[in-house]
Each structure stands twice: as structure tokens, then as C-alpha cells.
Amino acid sequence: MGLRGNPVDAYKQTRVRTASQGRVIVMLYDEAIRQLDVAGQALAEGAHSYDRVNAAVSKTQQIITELMVSLDFDKGGAFAQNLLNLYMFFNRELTEANLKKKPEPIAKVRSFLAELRDAWDQAERTSSYDGSAGSSGINIAG
């Protein structure tokens, strides 16, 4: 990135590149939750904001898809499979919410994502204090 680039974008790129795997997962959850908040607000504003609803829900589904492809089934086993099933459920619920412009599925998925985000955040924070030299953070089997 040259000197003419946006410094905020440069900061965000550096933040992601230097983050542990666990922190990246938390950041993905944070952005998915933020997008669902945008979708919920746009739905509350009515039909004139449906394009914003669609854009925010689509971004959330892209993030969920990224979480899906990051699953490690060799290391994660049943845990990874359960997360995959949950992510597929989230995408189905969000597709339905987007098609019918219903806020309830968006709120439900947001709630689940917030719980998962908090669990990943706790796991990431705990693993970064384990004191083991050369530790690269948590194993993102999920």
C-alpha cells in the first residue's frame, strides 16, 4: 500500500495479518454481528432500506462461509462437524430472513453468533496466557 492509501484500511490489514488464528475468528464474528445489526436497523426503517438489508445479510453469509471453510475436521472431529451444521443452519435462517424480510431469524442468528464469539474470545484469551513458549495460539479445529 502506497502513501496515498487510506491509513484506516492499512491499520485494519495489519491488524488482521498480525492476529492469532483465534483472534481472526473473533474478528470475523464481530463483523458478522455488526452486519446483522445493520440488517436489523435497515429492516426497522422499512422497504426503502431493503437493499441495505440484502447487502448486510449477504456480507454476514460470506463471513459464515469463511468460518465454514476454516474448519479443520481432522483436528476438530465432532466439534468441527457440529459447528459446520450450525453455520449451515445460520445461512438457511439468513436466506429465509432476507427473502421474507423478517427480523426474527436475524435476531436469532445474531444471538447465537454473539454466544459463539464470546466463547472464542474466552478461548483465545485463555490460550494466550498459557505460558508455553512458541505457542501459536489456539487450535482452530472449529
Image (spheres, grey):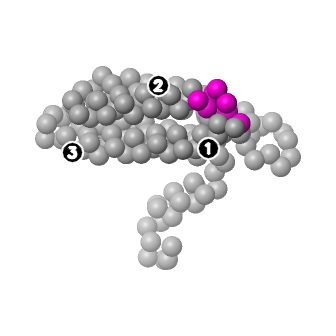
Lateral position of residue 106 relative to residue 51, left or right: right
Q: Relative to 11, is 105 above or below?
A: above
Which residue occupies the foreground of this view, 100 or 109?
Answer: 100
Q: Earlier in the sequence, mark 3 or mark 1?
A: 1
Task: Tell me the kind of residue under disc 3.
Answer: Asp
Q: What's the CA distance linking mark 2 and mark 1?
A: 18 Å
Tally the numbered discs: 3
Q: Please say whether residue 111 is one of the residues in the magenta stretch.
A: no
Q: Which residue is mark 2?
A: 112
Q: Nearer the viewer, mark 2 or mark 1?
A: 2
Classed neighbour count for the residue bearing mark 1: other residues with Cα under 10 Å, few (<14), some (14–19), many (≥20): many
Q: Earlier in the sequence, mark 2 or mark 1?
A: 1
- State left or right for residue 33 relative to residue 140: left
Residue 141 appears in view: no
Q: Label 1 is placed on what type of residue?
A: Arg
Q: Residue at x 50, y 45 (%)?
A: 66
Residue bearing mark 3: 51
- Place of residue 75 in the rendered image (x, y in percent of width and height, measured from the top left): 71, 36
Q: Hey, which quadrant is residue 36 in on the image? A: top left
Q: Residue at x 47, y 25 (%)?
A: 112
Is the Cβ of the residue at disc 2 closer than 8 Å to that at disc 1?
no
Q: Considering the numbered disc 3 on the image, is that residue within a helix, a strand or a loop?
A: helix
- CA gap, disc 3 to disc 2? 24 Å
The residue stretch that appears in magenta: 75-81
117 to the left or right of 132 = left
Amino acid on which the number 2 mark rests in the picture: Phe
